[in-house]
Image: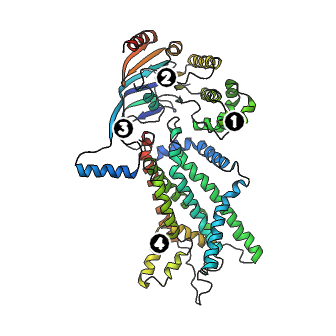
Amino acid sequence: MSLPLPAIEVTEMVKDFRVYHRTFASLKSHAAALAKTLVRREAHTGFETRRALAGVSFTVARGEAVALVGRNGSGKSTLLSILSRIYLPTSGEARLNGRMMSLLELGAGFDGELTGNQNIFFNGVILGLSEDAVAARYDAILDFAELDRQAMDLPVRMYSSGMQLRLGFAIAVHLDAEILLIDEGLAVGDEGFQEKCFAKIEEFKTQGKTILMVTHELDHVERLADRVLWLDKGVLVRDGGVAEVLAEYRQGYTHG
Amino acid sequence: MAQSGTAPASSIVIQARTHSPGLSAELRELWAYRHLVRTLVERDLRVRYKNSVVGVAWTMVNPLIQVFVLTIVFGYILGSGPKNISAYLFCATLPWTFFQTSVLDSSTSVLVKLPLLKKVYFPREIPLIATVCQNFVQFLISLGIFILYRWVVTPLLYHGSTWPPIQILFLPILILLLFLLTLGVSFFVATANVFYEDVKFILSIVMGFLFYLLPIIYFAENIFFSDSIPPNLRWWAYHLLLTNPLAWLITAFKQVFFGITDISNVHSPLPHHTSAPFDWRFLLLATFTCVAVCLSGYAFFNSRKWKFTERP
């Protein structure tokens, strides 16, 4: 038996975004920019390039729970979005070995007009499952969400935001992913339910599933993560154990 | 789970797209998400008619009213057009309505799903394909009703000819070509509309022109027999019109439903002109154009789809 593959491999990941000077796209603004270029004889591109990730490399082993920390705008969410296949990187490569499930926003795939029941199926199918596969998990999802069964026949737009989050998290954790990408998704619902979410994530860890999460809640990191990656201005500045990196991070936080 | 050095089937490689991954790779991914297309189509149809009393019957209302108005205008007010003009109008309106509504609906289909596409990954073409498929379902329902009208109701009421022309066997091919053409055009307009939202306004103007440029309220053969076109140009004008695949498809729909018919004004003196027979040369040409439009539209869409979520 050869060496097992790491769950996540990121090599030299670079991401540039174009920051446009104009805020909306139309033919008129395009024509105006072109005219300016011709009249002033200067290069008018209409955008600047901003580097969100400047060559980030790391690997996450199977069964590891890793937290990404950093200030706002340090590139954490960009990295997670690239791994979730929302954007393509400008250069570099990432490999995800295993079924990936990303929670950039709980309940993002909900349709307000459909009932809770229909949304369970709709969401599951958006995440790449067949309806039969969702049906097999239906009871477990409902039990986990602890929502009133009568509420499941109401359109989701009538749910409170807490109910939507419960349902979203319940669907997401029952889809048998091997790799979970979570963006700030842990502050879910009331304290009782939050505790349940933590317990579920800890259960995932014992099942050998891989977790990569972005959060600003450092106590969540201490509780769930095995390792911390610290991103600053698109560069990975620290990669190590929870206690040491967080100690340094907190220090930088108070001084910076 | 097998633990080996080789990548498992579910592994994903994410890298900068320096070259296209190829049509077969794109289609394979699309196939993996086929459940989503079906769910979206069902949901759209359900939501669209959920709070309406007559439900799916609304599908038929728009074409019926259009045919009714056109029949009044051309059949009675202007007194032009052949006998049974409403049947010809109905027949031509079916493919036209499908094309028009699909293209207009798809122009915004990807744009309205952008907030979702920024949160969840699924192939970007899925909202567009679902929109076209949903219109296609409505088209098939309308077509089914028209077939009933043409070969069940009409013979019962008027004791007319009961047997469809042999060319009706081409109908499935015509439907397939119409679908491919519509999908291809939709790919182009949806992509363009993500970056330039002017496109949907331009489109509605273009559709207004197309309605008159296409042989919907007239027969393509009317051009061939027109007195206002110089005789040496008639052949060219007729053939030029039919190189447009949509113009030929509409003509072919009339041909397979009605065979060779009298297309002259009921009041015009004899001899009357008749419609042209089904022409397989145009079928070959349209097959080529429709497939080409569909493939190039898909390639155009794919070359730009990863820029959608980064749009300014």
Disc 2 marks which residue?
A212
Pointer 4: residues within 10 angstroms few (<14), some, or many (20+)? Answer: some
Q: Chain of mark 2?
A: A
Lower position in the chain sequence, tag 3 or tag 2: 3
Q: Name the residue tied to disc 1.
A: A117
Judge whether A95 appears above or below B307 on screen. above
Q: CA distance from mark 1 to mark 4?
A: 51 Å
The numbered disc on residue B241 is 4
Do callouts 3 and 2 point to residues on the same chain? yes
Q: Amino acid at mark 1?
A: Asn
Q: Is residue B176 visible to the viewer in this orientation of the structure?
A: no
Residue at 56% from the left image edge and 41% from the top image edge: B33
Q: Amino acid at mark 2?
A: Leu
Contact between labelled residues 2 and 3, with CB atoms less than 8 Å apart? no
| Tag 3 residue | A18
Residue A109: image location, x then y, percent: 58, 36
Kindly state the secondary structure of the residue where label 3 is placed: strand
SS label for mark 1:
helix
Considering the numbered disc 4 on the image, is that residue within a helix, a strand or a loop?
helix
**For the C terminus of chain A, which image quadrant?**
top left
